Image: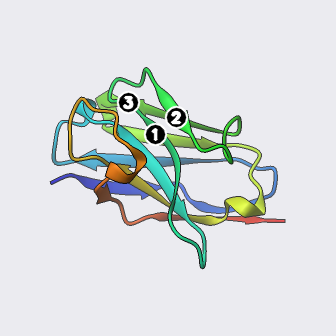
């Protein structure tokens, strides 16, 4: 069973930046893709970005493409989300996620393990 712990959220002004981190434990981190999702108040959770186990491929939601960057450090069991040019529409709880299957780049709806989330609030 994988455990995921996010950090790095906070309050930032529009146009600012934040970097989120997610540390994974409980299984071989370098064998699994990882993803970031978010949930704004009153809305369903939505996909933000994900990355293959080796980091050689990334996919982004259209709403964050060109502003957010997902990356990973397999030596530190950590996946990151660098968020630039933030807008109030990016305000949400951000969740790190992991799929159940190794060496597989999952469909967005195949993520099964979730962290507790970290709040990101962007003021206008």
Tell me how far mark 3 sits from mark 1, CA to CA.
Answer: 7 Å
Residue 85's x, y, as percent?
77, 45
Q: Quadrant of the C terminus?
A: bottom right
Residue that sits furthest to the right in the current view = 124
Q: Quadrant of the N terminus?
A: bottom left
Q: Residue at x 58, y 73 (%)?
A: 43
Disc assigned to residue 50: 1
Along the line of sight, which residue is nearer the eye, 118 or 98?
98
Along the line of sight, which residue is nearer the eye, 15 or 54?
54
Residue where numbered disc 3 is placed = 52
Chain-order first, disc 2 or disc 3: 3
Along the line of sight, which residue is nearer the eye, 119 or 60?
60
Q: Residue at x 81, y 57 (%)?
A: 14
Q: Secondary structure at mark 1?
A: strand
Question: Crowdedness of circle 1 by 10 Å Cα count: few (<14), some, many (20+)?
Answer: many
Residue 4's x, y, as percent?
31, 54
Q: Secondary structure at mark 3?
A: loop
Tell me how far mark 2 sits from mark 3, CA to CA.
Answer: 9 Å
Residue where numbered disc 2 is placed = 59
121 shown above or below 68 = below
Residue 68's x, y, as percent?
63, 40
Q: Residue at x 37, y 41 (%)?
A: 34
């Amino acid at each position: 069973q994988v455990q995921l712990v996010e950090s790095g959220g906070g309050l930032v002004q529009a146009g600012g930046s934040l970097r989120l981190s997610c540390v994974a434990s409980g299984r071989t981190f370098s064998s699994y893709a990882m993803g970031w999702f978010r949930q704004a108040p009153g809305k369903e959770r939505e996909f933000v970005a994900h990355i293959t186990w080796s980091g050689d491929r990334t996919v982004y939601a259209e709403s964050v493409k060109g502003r957010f960057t997902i990356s990973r450090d397999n030596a530190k069991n950590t996946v990151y989300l660098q968020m630039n040019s933030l807008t109030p529409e990016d305000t949400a709880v951000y969740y790190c996620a992991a799929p159940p299957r190794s060496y597989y780049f999952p469909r967005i709806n195949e993520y099964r393990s979730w962290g507790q989330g970290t709040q990101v609030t962007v003021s206008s």
